[in-house]
Amino acid sequence: MNEETVRSETQRSPYSGRWVALVRGRVIAQGGTPEQALRASLSSRYKEKPEIIFMSLPFTLPPLIDRIKDALPPEQEIYLVGGAVRDLLTSRLFAKHPYGAPDFDFALPSNGISLARKVANTLNADFLPLDDERDTGRVVITKEDGTRTFLDFATYRGANLEEDLRARDFTINALAYNLRDNTIIDPLNGANDIRAKLIRACSPTSMSEDPVRILRAVRQAAAFGFKIDKPTREWMKQSTDQLGRISAERLRDEVFKILQGPKPDASIRALDMLGVLQHLMPELLKMKGVEQSPPHIHDVWTHTLTVLDYLDHVISGLRVGYDADKTNDMFTGLLGLRLGRFREQIAQHFAQSLNVDRSHRSLLFFAALYHDVCKPDTKTHDETGRIRFFDHDLQGAEVAAERARAFNLSNDEVERIHAIIKHHMRIHFFGSRLLNEKQTPSRKAIYRFFRDSGKAGIDLILLGLADLRGTSANELTLETWTAYLDIARILLENYWERPEEVVAPPRLLDGHELMKELSLTPGPVIGQLLESIRENQAAGKIENREQALSFAREEMAKGPSAGEA
């Protein structure tokens, strides 16, 4: 049997992607590196000299990698390492990446910064020295839509490539692809763990060396549908008390990637079970065991996690291309029937991120995680014994904003989170009024809703639907769900289909004109009059400038004002 025959047959066998030792055309040993295959063969056939070859894998590299190859000096020793190699093996690299554009890490013996500069010049991209001590340079490729891809070029962390790989976080990421000969180096059997869907630490000290890996393990387990092996879980628990030495930015980035990914509720629950939350977001823990009155069926903490799950379902049920026929959930089916015509607008809403490094979706899930955070602080009982949480929305907005600032989120992100939590009860007010009084929101109420919430109004609608499902879960009635969908439809119709009529009517006159026509001096009354005019425009009671001035004169005639001349 010749070498080509061996390659052809073993590409369909467990040897694919492995180094094998051949003696007279037969595989006698295998390993993740040439050295491992050789050692394994000598242990049983020490008198024979085997041929060591790599059993290739059928995968295609993205065009960017070919461009990088062309930018490299001839014979440059360089490896693609980490998650990109893992994604190649799982065919995820060309799939829509859960955290935006994929990044690529490269390892080489020396001159990481100088090589990164050369690649940046060739690709006409941005360059920055990332870590002088570790000789690491970064190339930043910015696309027209503002998304960025990072290419990091780092010298080996250790004497050679294998030492570098063994110092990484998990075996599924301790893989290297040789750009020159298209072989894979896998000293810790990461490819086997990928096939077994297992996350395993590279060493017992992986977590203590960099505790942020605790969050990364949870995040990747959810993203790939993998399990974390038992020893790794124990090492994670033992290292949680060291999270305090990790920068707020690194912790934030992992939290928001978790919230962006699949099953955020399960991931947050896992962080809690591992003892991470007390070091990361301790204010969340006080929600545990806090009882709520019907229609709530869960305590506040379980309710919060359930809302995260339902929010995932609501957003998925309204995504472009969602097949409603495949759902067995009647409520999700109705969601698509009532609100499905807004799929494109909702997609555009989520595409407008407030920060290029974090998704809009993850920001909404962060707000959902905190929306009831102050219920424990505001819990009271009324005269009937019913549990109340007055002002938990207002106080919760402040607590969430404080945590957002501690995570060094941008001002726009902090304001959006604050607005979502502050106003999250307004959807329930509209729903309750429709159910109990058969009253839909008036045009003026719709105007005020979007005036106060702005673009966060869309987030509030989606969160409100998830909040309702998380409140009653399987006990939710069709009547209540339909009423909330009617509220959502009315609000979305006005926001996207009648914006100039109700949501943002055009200004008919400004403050200077108002002062001139009514002989007023500057003061608060000017702003109050202008806002009253806009409210009545939204209500359909004022349609032109003359009606606006007449309304203002009538308002001023109702009583003396400090704004009068």
Image: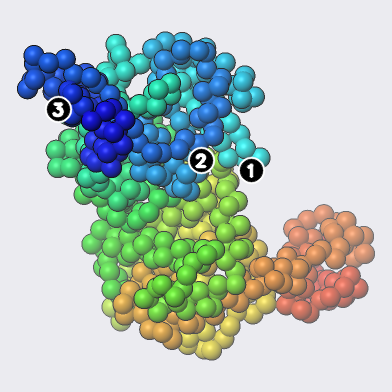
Work out whether residue 306 can be spotted: yes
Image quarter where the C terminus lies is bottom right
Amino acid type at mark 2: Ala
The spot of residue 86 in percent (x, y) is: 35, 37
Residue bearing the label numbered 1: 145
Of the residues under marks 3 and 2, which one precedes in the sequence?
Answer: 3
Q: Is residue 396 above or below residue 88?
A: below
The spot of residue 480 in percent (x, y) is: 43, 82
Residue in the foreground of this view, choosing between 313 and 183:
183
The spot of residue 125 in percent (x, y) is: 61, 26
Amino acid type at mark 3: Ile
Q: Nearer the viewer, mark 1 or mark 3?
A: 3
Residue bearing the label numbered 2: 101
Q: CA distance from mark 3 to mark 2?
A: 41 Å
Amino acid type at mark 1: Asp
Check residue 173 in the rendering and tell me which mark sits there, or answer none.
none
Which SS class for mark 1? loop
**287 left or right, relative to 330:** left
Tell me what residue is drawn at x 43 percent, y 24 percent: 179
The spot of residue 494 in percent (x, y) is: 66, 72
Of the residues under marks 2 and 1, which one precedes in the sequence?
Answer: 2
Image quarter where the N terminus lies is top left
Q: Is residue 7 above or below residue 374?
A: above
Residue in the foreground of this view, choosing between 229 and 80:
80
Work out whether residue 244 can be spotted: no
Check residue 28 in the rendering and tell me which mark sits there, or answer none.
3
Classed neighbour count for the residue bearing mark 3: other residues with Cα under 10 Å, few (<14), some (14–19), many (≥20): some
Of the residues under marks 1 and 3, which one precedes in the sequence?
Answer: 3
Tell me what residue is drawn at x 36 percent, y 80 percent: 476
Tell me what residue is drawn at x 45 percent, y 17 percent: 136
Image quadrant where residue 305 sits = bottom left
